Image: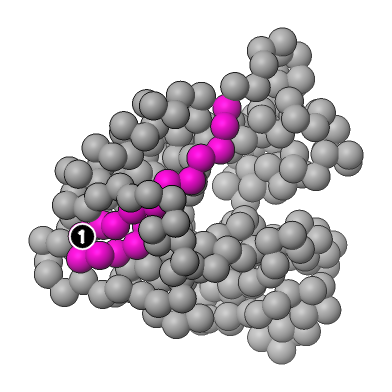
Amino acid sequence: MSGHSKWNNIKRKKGASDAAKAKVFTKVAREMSVAVKEGGPDPSTNGKLRDCIAKAKAANMPNENIDRCIKKAAGSDDKNSFEEIVYEGYGPCGVAVIIESLTDNRNRTAGDIRHFFDKCGGNLGQNGCVSYLFTKKGQIVIDNSEGELDEEKVLEDCFECGADDVDFDEDTVIIYTGVAELREVREALEAKGYSFDSAEPAYIPSTTTAITDEEASEKMGRLIEMLEDNDDVQGVWHNWEME
């Protein structure tokens, strides 16, 4: 993988404030609620719920919060009115952006996202306008900021567990899998004692776009912040070559 784009949603998570963590908890709880309503409250028989629980734990959501969310969703008679919608667009200087959302009001969400693009000098496009620039893969991120992981051992374990590729950086290990194989690889690595900063499907760019203009760079950063702060947005992916 080339360029700084692979750091998308990684470095930002590490320095998250309490307010940002609370927002992450809210989004994970929404995903968990949908998973429970679709497949039941037992994670042993509901793979999607297991994925949500793993995501919640990676975000350091307390166990009591996880249990409370599952019980609340299981005891609710409300029908699942949320739908997953993917939006695509261009940020400043033609940076490609993909947004994953989980919303109960598609008109509200589309309006908000369009407003963010307009305000930051970009434009919301049609489905397919930028997705061809990305490949969707499973992405598992392991923190190695303490430098305690042995590269040879990690690589051996990752490939034994079914990983397609591994980037071993000085403070982060990024493991790539097929989307369908993500859960299996994550659970196999968990069984070996690994813990993760994140483990989720990701849109990996095939090319990156640099921004040399300072004002445009600020607008692009603001666009990402506004999108990530929106309650309906579950993930933001781009091909900005961030320095």
Front one among 30 and 68: 30
Would residue 93 be counted in the magenta stretch? Answer: yes
In the picture, measured across the screen, residue 196 lies left or right of residue 16, that is: right
Residue in the image at 74% along x and 60% along y: 180
In the picture, measured across the screen, residue 5 lies left or right of residue 209, that is: right
Which residue of the protein is positioned furthest toward the top in this rendering?
77
Q: Which residues are magenta?
A: 82-98
Q: Quadrant of residue 38?
A: top right
Q: Can you see residue 14?
A: yes
Residue corresponding to mark 1: 92
Q: Please, what secondary structure does the residue beneath circle 1 have?
A: helix
In the picture, measured across the screen, residue 222 lies left or right of residue 12, that is: left
Which residue of the protein is positioned furthest toward the bottom in this rendering?
152
In the picture, measured across the screen, residue 192 lies left or right of residue 121, that is: right
Q: Position of residue 230 (x, y in %)?
A: 38, 36
Q: Position of residue 32 (x, y in %)?
A: 66, 34
| Main secondary structure type of the part rendered in magenta | strand
The vertical placement of 53 against 186, above or below, is above
Circle 1 Cα neighbour tier, 10 Å, few/some/many (<14 / 14–19 / ≥20): many
Q: Position of residue 132 (x, y in %)?
A: 47, 66
Residue in the image at 31% along x and 33% along y: 112
Q: Position of residue 107 (x, y in %)?
A: 39, 27
Q: Amino acid at mark 1?
A: Pro
Q: Can you see residue 237?
A: no
Residue in the image at 35% along x and 44% along y: 227
Residue in the image at 64% along x and 47% along y: 55
Which quadrant: the C terminus? Answer: bottom left
Q: How is the image coloured?
A: one colour
Q: How many marks?
A: 1
The vertical placement of 104 against 226, above or below, is above
Would residue 229 be counted in the magenta stretch? Answer: no
